[in-house]
Amino acid sequence: MKNRIDLHIHSLFSDGELLPSEIARRACVLNHSAIAITDHVDATNMDCVSRIIDAVDDINENWGINVIPGAEITHAPAEIIPKMVYQARDLGAEIIVVHGETLVEPVIGGTNWSAVNCEEVDILAHPGLITLEEAELARKNDITLEITSRRGHSLGNGHVANIAREVGANLIINTDTHSPGDLINYETAYKFGLGAGLTEQEVEKALEDNPLKIMQKKKLL
């Protein structure tokens, strides 16, 4: 079984069901080499980032998995997304995800645009009907677009894959885990990539090369 990296996971510090330690243990069993805990944040709960950092320090010292503290900027007014991103980064979030304009939630219009214009963003999650122009800006600003296994959010995967291919934007396959059953191994993630219409080579890049590229950029390896 190949090692897996998942850079979009939620704990009970936001709306997930598990403690960071149980997430890490379950990820170890599924042969993950690294995960990012990216709980939902807006202006009301930025202290969540510090709590995640405290939680993962002991895990990283004692277990054979790299647990990265992060944040997902979620349902914030599009105009303040850059401010939220920099606040989360200043508090120690290593991976910054922005909750994109998924097809199944009332995310405010302009969120994708604001995210891809902020170079400190690492991943635009489940960006729904992202436009060519937005994807081109993501490529230009080295922001990775997400293919997701999360129910509902995954409805846009095929569109995201096609748009990313057209402009040469990088893709990553994440779970957006909230519940124990959401975590998946490499082989299952591979199938989600194929289901989105990616070639085998594109799936391998999204599962292996691109997550490592993000981690190398942030000096997390």
Image (tube, rainbow, N blue to C red):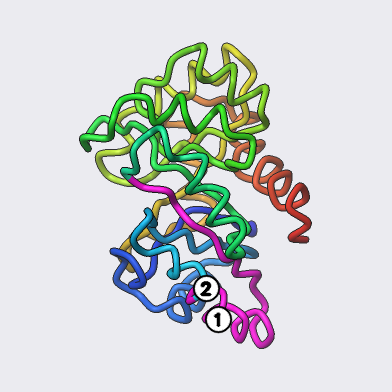
Q: Quadrant of the N terminus?
A: bottom right
Q: Residue at x 58, y 41 (%)?
A: 121
In the rendered image, is residue 192 in sight?
no
- For the residue pair 134 and 120, the one nearer the viewer reads as 120
Looking at the picture, does residue 148 appear above or below residue 51? above
Determine the secondary structure under disc 2: helix
Left or right? Give the position of 83 relative to 202.
Answer: left
Residue 175: image x %, image y %? 42, 51
Q: Which residue is mark 1?
A: 54
Q: Residue at x 52, y 12 (%)?
A: 133
Q: Residue at x 35, y 21 (%)?
A: 129
Residue 52: image x %, image y %? 50, 73
- The amino acid pointed to by label 1 is Asp
Q: Residue at x 46, y 76 (%)?
A: 20
Left or right? Give the position of 85 relative to 178.
Answer: right
Q: Which residue is mark 2?
A: 50
- The amino acid pointed to by label 2 is Ser
Q: Quadrant of the C terminus?
A: bottom right
Residue 221 sits inside the magenta stretch: no
Dividing the picture into quadrants, the one containing residue 35 is bottom right
Left or right? Give the position of 23 relative to 34.
Answer: left
- Mark 1 and mark 2 residues within 8 Å of each other at the beta carbon: yes
Residue 86: image x %, image y %? 57, 49
Magenta span of residues = 51-74
Left or right? Give the position of 193 relative to 56.
Answer: left
What is the C-alpha distance between the residues marked 1 and 2?
A: 6 Å
**Dot 2 surroundings within 10 Å: few (below 14), some, or many (20 or more)?**
some
- For the residue pair 107 and 178, the one nearer the viewer reads as 107
**Dot 1 surroundings within 10 Å: few (below 14), some, or many (20 or more)?**
few
Looking at the picture, does residue 178 appear above or below residue 137? below
In the rendered image, is residue 211 in sight?
yes
